[in-house]
Amino acid sequence: MFKLVKYDLQGYFKDFLIMISAIVILNVALFTRVNVWSSGSILALNMAIGFAAEIIVVIWNVKLFSRDIREDTSILLFTLPKSGKNILMNKIVTALIQMVIVQFVIFIFTAMWIQIFKVVQGGIIDIKIPFFQFIKSVSPKFALFTFLAILVIYITFLLTIYISITLSKVAIKNRKFGNLGSFAIFVILCITQGKIDELFSEIFPQTFKLNILNLDIPSVNPNNIVANGIDINIASIFVSVAVLILLFYATAYLLENKLDL
Amino acid sequence: MDVEFDSNIPIYMQIIDIVKRKIVKEELKPGDKLLSVREMSSKLKVNPNTIQRAYQELERNDITYKQRGMGTFVKEDISMVKKLKEEMAQNIIYSFIMGMKELGFSSDEIIKIVEEKVQEGK
Amino acid sequence: MEPLLKSTDLKKIYFRKQALDGLNLEIQKGKITGLLGPNGSGKTTFLKIAAGILKQSSGEILINGNKPGTKTKAEVSYLPDKDYLFKWMRIQDAVNFFKDMYTDFDEDKAQDMLKFMNLDPDSKVKTLSKGMSEKLYLSLVLSRKAKLYILDEPLGGVDPTTREKILDAILENYTENSSVLITTHLVSDIERLFDDVAFISEGKIVLFGNAEELRNERKMSIDELYREVFK
């Protein structure tokens, strides 16, 4: 079922090695600057490295799909006896795996730096509580919700890009305008999604409260940061998931039935 | 054997010819097994169905016979071989005589030339 | 007998050009058919539709009774005339890929063919010459036990020795249960392989028949007939 993932990841193996080595080497270089540069600038640089890496992974995630639609390798992919849904699913899973691996590496280094600076200096971030205690103090519901939200948002983002690329290949016959077309479609879709969300939130303003902090832990000062939790619009959640499902099926349908290579 | 076929004439006919020739020259003796359709097809780089058609013709003309599961064999019939030899000779002779007559040679001249040339060839 | 491939009044317009203009063709099981025509006659367009990577504008095409889709892709083995493998692959990766993706792939046969073609499994696909690539793709395509093999210009741009090997491979692979559709404009090299030939011009079949019968009737080779038809 997910055999394509194996091959796509294999194809990116070299890129992964380079990326991870770069992150490691750059952070090690930063390490030599510990007492030379301020902790603020080092942390900032570390975040810049992470940010750059993330941008690159997003580019990989997009290329993963666009390359197999625009180039001759599309023939290899689309003569396989696999449904559009299957192919799309494989691409998304590969993209997520790429993102998770790189995020993990970034996270390790950022966490490392934060711990170091907590020890060395009083911490340049406004939170006075130690890093890991911070994690424990977050309510599990919030953590889960955030995780799922990020997942849904990112997959929707990817699917919006994918469907833009697919639509431009299906509808725009002039190769030169292909990229421009995808971009235009992408922008239109993003605006549309925003508008739909706004609309539904207006029609159904009901929300539910989600506590950010785990109130069971005694050390947490309820007056700290966002004490009361945040309001989440219920309709928003349903709309987001519905949009994701819609995008997935629409893209899969186009891939299987409307693609002319 | 990379045989050059004359693609103007149906290939199956040329294959029949090749087999007949081999039989007459005793490269294929009565009772010998012919190459299988597949082997022949591979060797001559010809479509197997074409080979099949040739083999069928040969069977129909009683030159070969098929034994179920074993293959196609040359008929153990010396008179058949003789007849083939004569038939093929006839064709060559006929073409020769026609060709010579077309060039203007008379029957006597033809016979004389043939005698000379055969003697020389010895 | 139901034909393995049946195309009825197939039409395709793209880039404002009528690439296929009512193409009718039937391919029977166990036959090697040649689709002959000059560049631009619609050969590749037709093959792509049969392979399921292009959709027709109108008309019908059935492969083993099915419209092109996931089912037919499992029964059709297509050799395009482009470099279509992932650029990062070595030959062995390509073999593994086919093995993983196609249940009808015969790995032993593939390995044998690679040896026969003198291809090293460790070499990178992007370093192969045109001739070697062609031999590789053919080995992969023919190692599937498909019902219909579609070969787009398998002899294009290869030297005579490679050509011989390719013709050998196609013949070796022949079975009564499968069919082969080959397009080419190098007719004389390959005409001995054909059962049937179809001449395509401007998106239509202008002549179709059994190769041997055509030779008999017209007293010329298929190559000469090709020149006649397309002069």
Image (cartoon, rainbow, N blue to C red):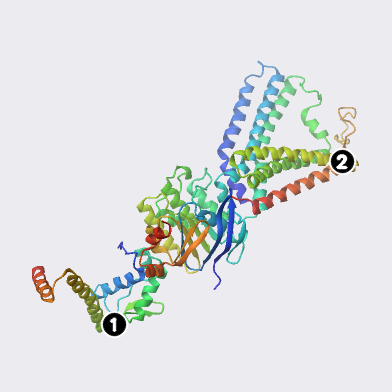
Identify the image quadrant of residue A49. Answer: top right
On residue C132, the disc is none
Q: Is mark 2 on a helix, strand or loop?
A: helix
Provide the residue designation for mark 1: B76
**Location of residue A101 (image quadrant):** top right
Q: In this view, does A182 lie above or below C49?
A: above
- Side of A221 relative to C182 (left or right): right
Note whether residue B96 is visible: yes
Q: Which chain carries label 1?
A: B
| Mark 1 or 2, closer to the camera | 2
Q: Where is residue A133 in the image (x, y as percent from the top left)?
A: 80, 31
Q: Quadrant of residue B116?
A: bottom left
Q: If the image is split into quadrants, where does the N terminus of chain A sit?
A: bottom right
Specify the amino acid type for callout 2.
Ser
User: Label 2 marks which chain's residue?
Assistant: A
Q: Type of residue at label 1?
A: Glu
Q: Alpha carbon of mark 1 to alpha carbon of mark 2: how far?
A: 96 Å
Q: Can residue C52 be seen in this view?
A: no
In percent of the image, x 64 and y 22: which residue is there? A31
Residue C21 lies, with reference to residue A194, above or below; the image says below
Secondary-structure class at tag 1 = loop
Q: Position of residue B54 (x, y in %)?
A: 36, 73
- Expressed as whole percent of the image width and height from the top left, the position of residue B78 reads 25, 82
Q: Nearer the viewer, residue C10 or B18?
A: C10
Q: For mark 2, what is the residue? A: A201
